[in-house]
Image (cartoon, rainbow, N blue to C red):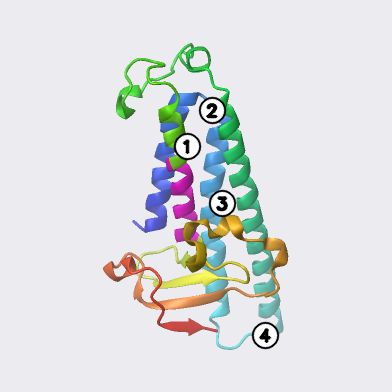
């Protein structure tokens, strides 16, 4: 399993555990949309990479690359919007959450509470909910980073990092997407940095080693 798929799976598990805690379907939907957006971005980056590697490109193929780039840029904007909406929604909901009233009275509330340390509904307050929020947000950033900056969807593909004007994953790490301004992108192409190893290999653990540049 690729690292991006693993982080996506962990995000789904954390989303489910949080739903058992807060009984908020809206938070579930927004969390799933964030992960799905990462997966869509991964497909777009992979498609762009494969199209851009053709030795000779005609006018129609260059126009196709431009179209894919524009769609990719819009997907990044959508990801940012959905992520911020999710953060604000979960924060406001959990700050005003009354566990006894909103969750304990729910017929299926706290079914899996013993998994994360509380057998009795309401015991311990909201600490576990906020801990799940934090873990989920970090995991979503990791899933995005692996999906977008580390391209490729299948094992044994060559590891390659994607970057574009104003987005440098090595400067702020997994939080680079939060500082990225998609409305100030001057370049019209994604730059790929290729490593000599393949996805899923042991050498992939050395994040950031650059071997060659693809034009």
Mark closest to the chain's N terminus, 4 or 2: 4
**Residue named by callout 4:** 58
* Mark 1 and mark 3: Cα distance apart in space: 18 Å
Q: Are marks 2 and 1 in contact (CB under 8 Å)?
A: yes
Residue at (62%, 51%) from the top-left corner? 80
Mark closest to the chain's N terminus, 2 or 1: 2
**Residue named by callout 1:** 133
Position of residue 177 relative to residue 28, above or below, is below
* Occupied quadrant, residue 165: bottom right
SS label for mark 3:
helix
Neighbourhood count class around disc 4 (C-alpha, 10 Å): few under 14, some 14–19, many 20 upward? few
Between label 4 and label 2, give the one nearer the viewer.
2
* Mark 4 and mark 3: Cα distance apart in space: 30 Å
Picture coordinates of residue 133 (x, y %)? Answer: 47, 37
Mark closest to the chain's N terminus, 4 or 1: 4
Residue 153 horizontal side relative to residue 114, left or right: right
Q: Is residue 80 magenta?
A: no
**Residue named by callout 2:** 94
Q: Which residues are magenta?
A: 135-147
Q: Main secondary structure of the magenta part?
A: helix
Neighbourhood count class around disc 1 (C-alpha, 10 Å): few under 14, some 14–19, many 20 upward? some
Picture coordinates of residue 31 (x, y %)? Answer: 53, 40
The label number, if any, that marks residue 112 in the structure image = none
Mark closest to the chain's N terminus, 4 or 3: 3
Between label 1 and label 3, give the one nearer the viewer.
1
Between label 4 and label 1, give the one nearer the viewer.
1
The label number, if any, that marks residue 37 in the structure image = 3
């Amino acid at each position: 399993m690729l690292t991006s798929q693993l982080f996506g799976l962990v995000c789904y598990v954390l989303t489910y555990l949080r739903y058992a805690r807060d009984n908020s379907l809206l938070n579930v939907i927004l969390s799933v949309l964030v992960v799905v957006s990462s997966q869509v971005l991964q497909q777009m980056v992979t498609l762009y990479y494969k199209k851009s590697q053709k030795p000779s490109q005609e006018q129609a193929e260059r126009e196709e690359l431009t179209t894919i780039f524009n769609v990719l840029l819009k997907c990044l904007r959508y990801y940012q919007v959905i992520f911020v909406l999710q953060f604000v929604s979960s924060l406001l909901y959990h700050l005003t959450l009354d566990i006894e009233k909103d969750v304990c009275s729910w017929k299926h509330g706290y079914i899996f509470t013993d998994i994360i340390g509380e057998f009795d509904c309401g015991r311990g307050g909201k600490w576990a909910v906020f801990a799940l929020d934090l873990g989920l947000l970090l995991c979503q950033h990791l899933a995005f980073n692996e999906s977008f900056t580390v391209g490729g969807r299948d094992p044994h593909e060559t590891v390659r990092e994607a970057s574009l004007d104003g987005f440098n994953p090595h400067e702020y790490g997994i939080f680079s997407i939060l500082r990225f301004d998609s409305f100030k992108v001057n370049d019209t192409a994604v730059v790929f940095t290729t490593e000599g190893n393949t996805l899923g290999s042991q050498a992939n653990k050395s994040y950031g080693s650059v071997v060659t540049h693809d034009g």
